[in-house]
Amino acid sequence: MVGKYRHRIHKMTKIRIKKGMSSESNPTKHRHREAAGAARARSLSTGMMEAVDDRPEAAHHLLDKLVGLWLTRRMSIGREQDFSNKSMVSDGAVSRISQFTACTNQSFDSVHRLWKSGSPMQKEVVVVLAAVAELIKEHNGSETDVEYFAALLTTLEGSSTSEPCRTAAISFLLQLIVKKVSKDVLQSKFARTVQVLYTKILENSENPEGSALKYLLSVLGVVLRAQPAYVWNAANTKNILVSVAALCVHEKPWVRTMARRVVRAVLTDPVTAMDNGLHAASPSVGTFVQQHLQAASGDMAAIRYLCLLEGIMHKMPSSLFKQLAEIILRSLAVADQMVKCSALQCLHRCLQRQPCDAALSVEVNVLLVKALRELCPPSEDVTVCAYWMQALAETHVCLTAKDPNSRIDFFIKRFSVVKLFDTGNEQLAQVTYQVYGTFFFGIVLCRIMRTVRKFFSHFWIRSEMRLFEVAGIGITGDEFCKAMQTLALLREGNDSFCRQELDFTVGCAVRHVGAPAVLSAIPLGIDTDAAILDIEFTRSWMIPILRVNLHNAPLEFFSSYFLPLAMKIHRYFSVLLLIVVIFSQLWELLPSFCDSPSDIEKSFPQLAPVLGAALNERPDLRPSILSALRRISRFCLLPDAFPERVEVVSAYAKNFMPLLFNLYTTTSSDDSADKGPRMAILETIRAYADLTPKRLVAQFVDAAITKANDAFDDASRQARILDILCAIVRNADCTTLGKVMDTINPWFAINEVQKKAFRILEEISNKRISPELEPFFLSRSTDFVNSLLRPIDTVVPPARAAFCACIQSVVDSMDDLPKLSDFCLKSLDAVVLTLDKSNSTHARSNASKCLQHMFNKLIQVGGEIDQHPSAVVNDLLSRMYELMVPVDSCDNGTVDLCTARSTLVALNIIAQKQLRILNGGHISRLIAHGCAWIGDGRPPVRILVIRLLRVLTKKLPEYALQQYRDLLLSSIFDGQPTCDVTSKVRKANRLLLEVLVARFGIDILLKYTSKLDWVKQMKNIGKLTKRKERQLSEGPAKKDSDDGSISGTDSRLTSRTAGADTILKLLENSDASESEGEERLAEMRSRTGSVWLKEDTDMGDSTDLLDRKKMILKVTTCDPAKQHKKIVERRNNSDFGFKTSNDGRLIIGNSVLSGSRASSWRTGTTQGIHRETSLRNGKIRHSKGKNAKNKKLQPYAYIPLRRKGVKQVHNCCYFH
């Protein structure tokens, strides 16, 4: 406590220890390592290593010892037992403790682990647990938490005071199991439980061994926290808590700590608190502590009571809080420094918890500030002074929360601790700095804004953004309004030079301060009451900022501000197109409000009818409303969502869901144009279904099934109804899911509705992890398997994606290896054949995931029973090879193309994902299979075989690759046919050859082939590899070239540099001199910090620099003198302006700029796509026509008013 601020003397002459020599350089300081090694050696076996099954005597060594201990110190909880007949849970010496106890309850897993070496209580705990477990089994118990709790409580009641270790062991087991017992049991058995625990606490309070008392207090704390609020009205319960508080001065530290934890946990429990936030037992505990503080005159007992008080004082009534504060302040007059620091720390930590008005009123807070100021300790006492400053700072913080103006007066008039910076103590100065930071954060915040605005510059914008982020809603006021108005005025100026920074700053204010405060300072400026609506909407830039930055905004603000505004401007729809845009932008703010509304419980019932009417009558507003409903649903389903929030939104499911059903099932003449809105409606139905009550979901499912059966004549309507059924079925209960399964079972044989049936089955399968649906899946497991074990030919192509997803879900639910292997083998053909290219991308993706999941699940389940992965997947691999066997035992061509292609895709997946678990036999067969099929004449099959060999060559280890080198290389170079060599086959061979060169090298590959095509490709690959290595090694040297030139490859535009405007501007005139380039670079770098004032002769010679509005309008980032000079030069140029004909029409001739553009584009380097292909023998070729010089200039009607595009084309061409 005191040592936190004491002055430490550090030794500067430390001995440097070399790296890696720390254990050898200090041989006198390794006694801890030796002790740890000895303890570890004692806990392990010192004999020869042998199998666990071969040494049964080791497993019974501890058992015999514990049995002897139990027989000599038998517990009086039942008749004597013969431990030789105990049932063992597991085998081996590692689990010898769990063998002895025979306890299967997981709450006692910590008992079965290895404890610290030499633990005195381990033996007692194991013996007690073994006896209690045997007692429960005698009475045919199931070893539940409640049974263990009752048995241990009975054992504790019968334990003797002469055996404190036995009581401690029982208490230890009780504190492990009491946390798992439900509150209903603890409340119903409260009287007996408290009687037993309180009696044992009193018996062991004077015992020098504090282990039993520590665990008893822990159990009592859990029991007391589980009681309802009315229990604390009884005097006996309050007295129990007072008795626990008396143990806060016990001699044992752990007893004191546990007693403080129990008292604090009970008094600060918000569940049992009264309406004013205080606990019913707080006056009794507070009075007890007050009496002992008055009796203790600065001894150690007072410090210990102060430690208790710092965690519960903020829950004391106001009168008692004032009396305790007076006692604490009087203790500052004690000479003992420890008592002073403890008293001030008690105040500091109590006030950090922000006491409510019922505990600390404003008047008492003011008196506390005055008293602390008068008790200012001397600066020489560093520790007490530091604690005093922290306590005083917290009193001001509490006073600010209750009365902000009072805190400002106290700070300005009476608080001055600047002199503490001059004490010469670094730690005290650091504490003083932190205290001042606390004051300035809340007091001088508005004054900082006022001061910063006086020194206005564009740097102020970023600082204000950070100010909004830190301050939040506490910064609202007149100064905030003036600051936002200044930002808006600067943003709306024509010469605004930092609009992005301004948008970020306003957005930060919207996010952290709040949209209502920002719009009250700078409203949108739309006057809907005017007879003629003003189309100069200068604040249009605010709507996108609001849409992006709205966070924790009140939904009521949208209902009261934006919704009436949108309704009023709707009457101008037929007049102005701009109003239509503004109207849609205002409604697009609704989803942002619904992301995380702060008042959804209050505002959603008012807004829901409006949304329902607009959803039904306004198709143009449906996207925004549907997005808002989806976001509200996601917000209500967050893990920390309150139940009231869910209840409010789910109450309107009966209104929104039928409306969404009607909108989705309504037919449209143009299905392609209607697809986007319909998908949005379906997603909204799926999101809102998670909030719909189960009873209502059952009604919707019954109605959907009835309408789907009646709509077999209308395929489009039936498909939409089944889409709705698929969206809402995942939130149904067991009974409703049973009806759905009975309905869709016949649909698996009907091609028209087979896809919808499998989609519904997929949604149901995804709910397997739900505990309440476990009975349904257990009773319907046969239906799931039978619906999926069907040939792939009977499944229509659109349904195969959902079909594979259902197979994957069933595989994931199986844990029995024989059943899993049988199901995977039966469904393997359908999954593999779905990998063919003739199926959709979604179906192939699901089939690939399903195949990988089959192998992973088999490996996982097989590993639990010590099965090797290769043995588990052997049947599946064999079936894959059987699919590739020719039908008529002829050549490979007799295998169907779809079957061969899909099987090779599956083998590619296995080689890519599961190669590391295959044994040597499987790898040999896989390589032989690829080498045999590389001679297939069909290009699609050969491409997959080449890819398979490439994956194997890349992933196989070196020893395996060298083993199969001859077979691989001879098959690749000599086994491929020369006919039907398409571009894709050549590309696949090229990729394979690159991998071969990387693994084997060119010299080895040349020994296996002399074909010119292969040799040429190998040499080219070798050249490219050497070139890449050389470029990587010469990369840094090119950047530091002497002439500073930029290579052609470095100057090419990419997607990553297309947005770098500053770099592009610097490279526009790259033909300028080096000095000019440096000047332009310096000018670009300094432009961000340069600000000029516009010249205005109408305003006179003098300029009022303190007039903020006029100064903002006169600020510019361009030098007015340079702009004026450029204008004069252009006017003096003889070519400036337009030429006119005799009849007065304008003429455009061949400008010098276009000629220079063509010449600059055709001159320079002759590499790449910009080589001079039009030149031959120094003459220019013309396709047809005569030279442009011989043409007569003709008047032209089109006049290019801007030369910017021409200049950009010229610069870009020269840049290339």
Image: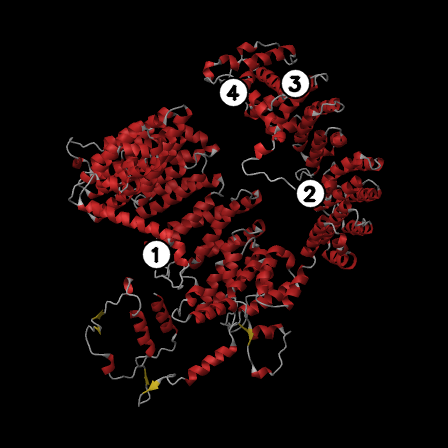
> Separation of disc 3 and disc 1 at Cα?
76 Å
Between circles 2 and 4, the one closer to the viewer is 2
Res. 339 in view: yes
Instruction: Give the residue number, with chain letter if any, for mark 2.
Output: 10
Q: Residue at x 26, y 67 (%)?
A: 1172
Dot 3 corresponds to which residue? 155
Image quadrant in which the N terminus is located: top right
Q: Is residue 892 left or right of residue 1114?
A: left
Image height of 487 relative to 713, above or below? below
Q: Is residue 893 above or below residue 1084?
A: above
Q: Secondary structure at mark 4?
A: helix
Amino acid type at circle 4 is Val
* Quadrant (top left/top right/bottom left/bottom right) for the C terminus: bottom left
Q: Amino acid at mark 1?
A: Ala
Amino acid type of disc 3? Answer: Thr
Callout 3 touching callout 4 (CB < 8 Å): no
Element type where label 2 sits in the image = loop
The residue under label 4 is 94
x then y, percent, for residue 818: 35, 24
Q: Do labels 1 and 2 touch, CB within 8 Å? A: no
Label 1 near label 4: C-beta < 8 Å?
Answer: no
Spatial distance from mark 3 to mark 4, Cα to Cα? 29 Å
Residue behind mark 1: 673
> Who comes first in sequence, dot 3 or dot 4?
4
Return the disc, 1 or 2, that comes first in the chain's sequence: 2
